[in-house]
Image (spheres, rainbow, N blue to C red):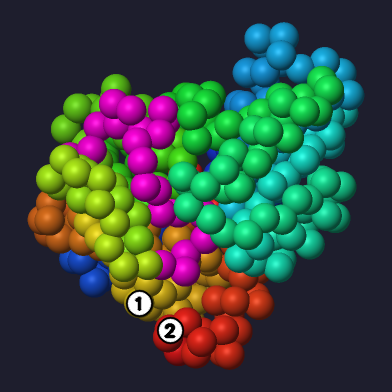
Amino acid sequence: MHIAADTIALIGNTPLVRLKGPSEAANAEIFAKCEFANPGASVKDRAARFIVEDAEEKGLIQPGGTFVEGTAGNTGIGLALVANAKGYKTIIVMPETQSREKMDTLRALGAELVLVPAAPYSNPGHFVHTSRRIAEETQNAVWANQFDNIANRRAHIVGTAPEIWEQMDGRIDGFTCAVGTGGTLAGVGLGLKEKDANVRIALSDPHGAALYEYYAHGELKAEGSSVAEGIGQGRITANLEGAPIDTQFRISDAEGYEWVRRLLDEEGLCLGLSSGINVAGAVRLAREIGPGARVATILCDTGFRYLSTLYNDEWLAAKGLA
Ligand code: PMP
């Protein structure tokens, strides 16, 4: 019998599931990493753990210290639970547009929550810049800086990628996911290429993000918008630098949402919209590679985090997704 030594040891080693509907739709084999099975119910627990342990190893944080971070919510939840397990505090800065459930979860975990209006990155009031300022003004505090701290992607180079490789017995043709910080896509991409340089790595970019145009035509350019939380990047973060991207897709909210609905109704998986966008991208990548392609992607977080939004008919109607 295997017993985890503590909460931190529960992070990672998530199950891989075969997705029936997407596999049939693509005439391929589509597999997904169940990141909602992490203790904080998202892929970001992995980055949170590596960022905290990196700060400890570098002697940046003292006992009882504080981690400060700007986040769409999931990184905050991961940081708060890792911090609680290790005796640190957290101050989490979040745009007020994110789901109510994430805010309630952060408060329940004891994080000090700072809500700021949604603003462009160039605005000093943007949640990332606000979190950096708070970290500078707080004693014995570390700014987690998930976008440009490459401890984030290391979690996926040494964790997620080898896990996928082993779970698929080294028989994998492609991997895709969307980008928030880029830690998952760049980290899994680098980790899988280390095993086999022929694995095709694809970006699945939501509308409103600038990366599709960048990887397709060399120019950071955004078009449209998305209501997906946690994804949609407008710049090349340090985590994205050198990411081995072979191909890219632009995925609409409607295309991603169709998979969210089908995975719930047909396979009993309750997911967030970024997971739906990833699955839509996996179907496209498998079709591009050809019949029988074995493609992996990420189920980033649990749909229970979006009961008031993605699973609420009024909200869906207001966002044009009903
Ligand atoms: N989906 C969700 C729901 C997220 O919270 C995040 C993290 N911001 C991502 C996807 C993207 O992950 P990454 O930061 O590794 O690019």
Instruction: Please report the bounds of the magenta region as a residue range.
Output: 226-248
Of residue 92 and residue 275, the one placed in the foreground of this image is: 92
| Pointer 2 local density, CA inside 10 Å: few below 14, some 14–19, many at least 20 | some
Residue 142's x, y, as percent?
A: 71, 24
Residue 152's x, y, as percent?
A: 52, 30
Q: Are marks 2 and 1 in contact (CB under 8 Å)?
A: yes
Left or right of 186? Residue 263 is: right
Left or right of 179? Residue 51 is: right
CA–CA distance in space, label 2 to label 1: 6 Å
* Dot label at residue 321: 2
Left or right of 87? Residue 303 is: left
Label 1 belongs to which residue?
254
- The kind of residue tagged 2 is Leu
The vertical placement of 128 against 161, above or below, is below
| Pointer 1 local density, CA inside 10 Å: few below 14, some 14–19, many at least 20 | some
Give the main secondary structure, helix, strand or loop, of the magenta stretch. loop
Q: How many marks?
A: 2
Residue 182's x, y, as percent?
A: 41, 39
Residue 200 visible, this orientation: no
